[in-house]
Amino acid sequence: MFSLSGEDTPLPNNDETIEYNPNVPPSRPRARDTNDAPLEFPGYVLEGELGRGGLGVVYRGRDLTLNRPVAIKVLASTEGSQEQRQKVIEEARRTAALGDRCIVTVYGVIENQGNAAIVMELVDGHELQNVSAVLEPKQIAKIVSETARALSVAHRAGILHRDIKPQNIVVTPAHEIRILDFGLSIEMDSATVEEGFSGTIAYSAPERLQGLPATPATDIFSLGVLFHEALTGRHPFAKLGKPPTISSILAGEPTLPRALRPEIPEDLERICLACLAYQPEKRPNAEEVHQGLVNYLAGQPVQMKDSVVKDHLLNRVEEHVNTIEEWCELGLVENRERDQLRWLYRRVLEGDDLWPTETRKLRVGELGIYICIWTALIASAFTATIYRQDVGVLFSWLLPMGTTLTLGFAGLLTQQLSRKRVTPLFFGAAILSLVPTLIAILTAMVWAPIPGSDSELFQNVGIANRTLFAASLVSLIAAVIRLNRTGVSFYAWVAAILYSSTHLSLLLMAGYLTWQDGPQAVGILSLAAAWLMGTGFETMKKPRFARPFHWLGAIGLVVGLFLLAEVPTLRWFGVETLNYTASKGWSLALSGFVLLLVTHLIENSIRLERRRIAHYLEWVCPIFILGGLYQAAQSSNPVVGWDTAESIWVTVGPFIAAVAMFIALTARTWRPRFMLSAMVGVALSIQLLEHHDLVPVRFLMLAVSIVGLLLAAAFYARMELATHSRKSEKPPPPPISQD
């Protein structure tokens, strides 16, 4: 790693290419004076000096044999550099074989009287640094796109450039580009271990400054620095008007281009910052950079994630989140407001997450793709199941198989073309289409339903429950594998759907259709086990993958408890005291109290997604509790064998008590949905008392008015005299990146 006398010492010459090797004593190129014999190379004439650098001097010359102008780079004559010069010569010979239109053509290598030189194409044009200030962003994008394309050609041939910078990019009058100085190139698969450093420090990747060998990713980083400078006119690591330093490059926090020039298109900033990712594995390859810029120039979506912006946002968001937590402790914001802000910050951090249905940036073409794929999936599902006998056995599996293969091929194609935004959609749809495909094939070739069985869901079309289970399980495994390989949360949602399908088909295999209502409700309630899978993902610090399983578990819990109430639950447990209507209403209320308990448990969770689920469950709880108790209170004879008027209080009393409970919950925790429930409950309580003639109407209205006013006065007094209670200590929430 390089070390300077001061941590923030600017680089001595940002544009100079240097050669450094720890095993070779430092030396400078030997200056030629008037006593030196003039350079001579048979067949060539040197006409004048064009420039010089760390590797030698470039002359304008003429090839006498072909009578054409050429550029002749005479390698520096330094002590002990013979081996190094030979290496550069060999690399130049390899570069000559590339033959790309954007790479300066190497005509040959010449040697005479101990001097070595590389003969190259003489390019008429201007260095990029001299013209970038007058170029539009689209023109710069075209130049960088061509540079990236040429680099991809070199990288595929196993050759690195190692010194990409504006001085080595020449723009011709025809707006074509030429890449100079491939003399620093090196074979990636070379058996020789690279020692030291070659290149320009200001354009070098952090890992190169730390002494690691060059890779294709180091060329991409240099390209990102060049791109940033061309767009903004400033080096990405120049801070507060000061030149870039080694420490600023190693810090890995480039200036955002749009912070300097807001008119820069967002897509260009995304590509530029992707190239400047600190970790080499997070940078795109040259072909992906080229394809992204081609998409931008064609007006198509750019599907490239940049870790630089995410890291930048993460640092800022963490600061804001910590401030919000302090505000919450001081009572400046409520818990729900805190959670809403955390939710918005989390969406900002996640960005698209390569999520195909991200509506914030949904385009018309993409919307058409989604609808068409959904149509194809529905057609495949209907063909393999409901209309299987109508279309014929052969067609019933050929169509789903063709759909699956087509979607899979489209996923591979878009992946090769770096269309990362729609690639998960095609692969996810192919995985879902695999279910009807396997159902049709297994039904035609392996399994048939048990004749005359009442437990087969699709008995009438000849599909066995075990076929549904096998197809769902195989597709679930495929979704999990894809999720593990890509880390795209879309596959977690696909996996959650297939998990529910696998779970339900397993219930069918266990004879679900022949069960009584109670066991059937418990079977649906068992879907809540998806919470365990979500918890497992959270343990692995992958909360994005846990989200769909938490929601699936919540849906299973609500639906299962509702179905239990429909049994009804009290009758299932042998409680026959109430009539059927009252028993059903109380069973629904009992399910509501279970939901209220679950809501209370998860609303205090340190996990944001669980608290969000609790927020929605709080709307369901009053519906279950008050709705069920109101249904029971409607009955004139709720208790079996007790026909007196007093029996009505058995159901009306609990309803009024539940209303009082929601009033207390509103006063204690302030939940708008609880307050709304309490207000509706008060109105329904008055209606029930009048409906059953339990209290004279005139007395009822007077008493309600007086009690209401007295309670209002009491609450006002409490509000004036209340003191802040000591808040119980809670574990701190996890960082926003893990929530």
Image (cartoon, rainbow, N blue to C red):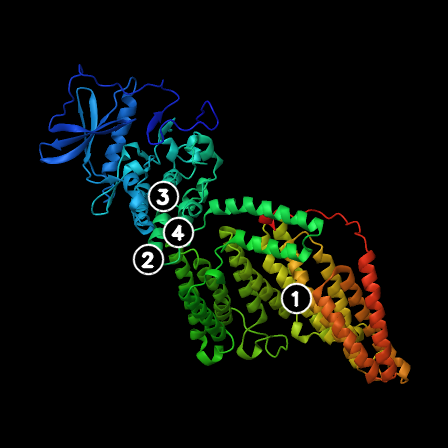
Instruction: Give me the C-alpha separation between circle 2 and circle 4.
Output: 19 Å
Instruction: Say whether marks 2 and 3 touch (CB < 8 Å).
Output: no
* SS of the residue under disc 2: loop
Instruction: Give me the C-alpha separation between circle 2 and circle 3.
Output: 19 Å
Q: Residues within 10 Å of mark 4 (few under 14, many from 20)?
A: few
Q: Nearer the viewer, mark 3 or mark 4?
A: 4
Instruction: Say whether marks 2 and 1 touch (CB < 8 Å).
Output: no
Going by the numbered disc 2, the residue's amino acid type is Ala
**N-term mark: 2 or 3:** 3
Going by the numbered disc 4, the residue's amino acid type is Glu
Most extreme residue toward the top is 35
Image height check: is 550 above or below 643? above
Image height check: is 717 above or below 580? above
Instruction: Give me the C-alpha separation between circle 3 and circle 1.
Output: 51 Å
Q: Position of residue 282 (x, y in %)?
A: 45, 44
Going by the numbered disc 3, the residue's amino acid type is Phe
Q: Is residue 67 left or right of residue 488?
A: left
Q: Position of residue 219 (x, y in %)?
A: 36, 39
Q: Which residue is mark 2?
A: 298
Q: Is residue 303 left or right of residue 587?
A: left
* SS of the residue under disc 1: helix
**N-term mark: 2 or 1:** 2
Q: Nearer the viewer, mark 2 or mark 1?
A: 2
Q: Position of residue 552 (x, y in %)?
A: 62, 63
Image height check: is 410 above or below 30? below
Of 315 and 627, which appears nearest the observer? 315
Q: Which residue is mark 4?
A: 263
Disc ID at residue 227: 3
Q: Which residue is mark 1?
A: 556
Q: Quadrant of residue 218?
A: top left
Q: Quadrant of residue 204?
A: top left
